[in-house]
Image (cartoon, rainbow, N blue to C red):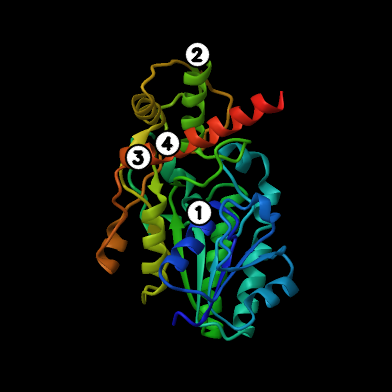
Amino acid sequence: MKAKMIVVAGAGGFIGGHLVGELIRKGHRNIRAIDIKPFEEWYQLFPEAQNIKSDLKGKSACVRACRDASEIYNLAADMGGMGFIEKNKALCMLSVLINTHLLQAAVEANAERFFYASSACVYNADKQVSEDVVALREEDAYPAMPEDGYGWEKLFSERMCRHFREDYGLETRVARFHNVYGPHGTWDGGREKAPAAICRKVLHAEATGNHEIEIWGDGKQTRSFMYIDDCLKGIDAIMHSDILEPLNLGSNELTTINGLVDMVEDIVGVKLKRSHNLDAPKGVNGRNSDNTLIQEYLGWAPGIRLRDGMAKTCAWIREEYEQRQAASTVAN
């Protein structure tokens, strides 16, 4: 199996970069890593892989990408945190072209398996209106009322995977990611998610001595966050399982955004004055992963403690922040 071609779409992104690294660590050497970004913007770049800059929204690019492929992992999408998703709905929905064309190319290449990275944003919004959240079960995606734009694209692409399996025999697998975080990801610029944004804000407050922090929303929103190592283990388990239906892939350790700020303050060793921006994008009020099915089917569920993962993430962001500050000082 390790001699067969593995394609990772979105390899220049956060999860895609970690996935390529994990495949290499497992001994795979026939890896085609593809992303639309210039190589210098990839979060991780591995010389052991065949690295390609390509726009996979086009069918011909997908055909080239999937040539001789045995396994295809589609993690390519135009996305970011809530600030990006709420203001770029059309861009998010255009990612449907990537998955559609990759599925077609996978069939033409006689690929054995196809993994699609979906999202908890597919879930019915009526199930997420309260901070006193009931964990989301896979069946809660229907009747459909997903996150506008990004969530609709993900739900539609899930159905495409199902029908390509039914109509063409392509072994498709789908995981619904719940807020993946960790090192080597976006931590500023507007596309970062809450764990990275809070780490950056707390570290900046510590470095500048301006001990204040702005929190989007009232901070009572509840979420679960999955560390990248758990995500990689889940991708492998789901991809090589016999489970045909989409599965939740997320931690069920619930926290509020205020609680996440408390945690990062404690990790950094600083206490900040808080202000709440009630006009900023904040997403749904409550969301958590029900892990009943993944535990039943695979005998496993994500379990890395949030505190442990946040400590590692914060340490990495501190290094990145300090390097940027040092470079800025030299330039000036």
**Residue at numbered disc 1:** 122
**Residue type at numbered disc 4:** Ala
**Circle on res. 269:** none
Question: How far across and how far down the image is residue 252, in percent?
Answer: 31, 47
**Front residue (pair 306, 290):** 306
Q: Is residue 162 visible?
A: yes
**Residue at numbered disc 4:** 315
**Residue at numbered disc 3:** 133
**Front residue (pair 172, 5):** 5
Image quarter of the N terminus: bottom left
Q: How many marks?
A: 4
**Residue type at numbered disc 2:** Gly
Tell me the crowding category of disc 1: few under 14, some 14 to 19, or many 20 or more residues within 10 angstroms, Cα based: many
Q: Gap between marks 3 and 1, in whole Å?
A: 16 Å
SS assignment at label 2:
loop
**Circle on res. 209:** 2
Q: Quadrant of residue 53?
A: bottom right
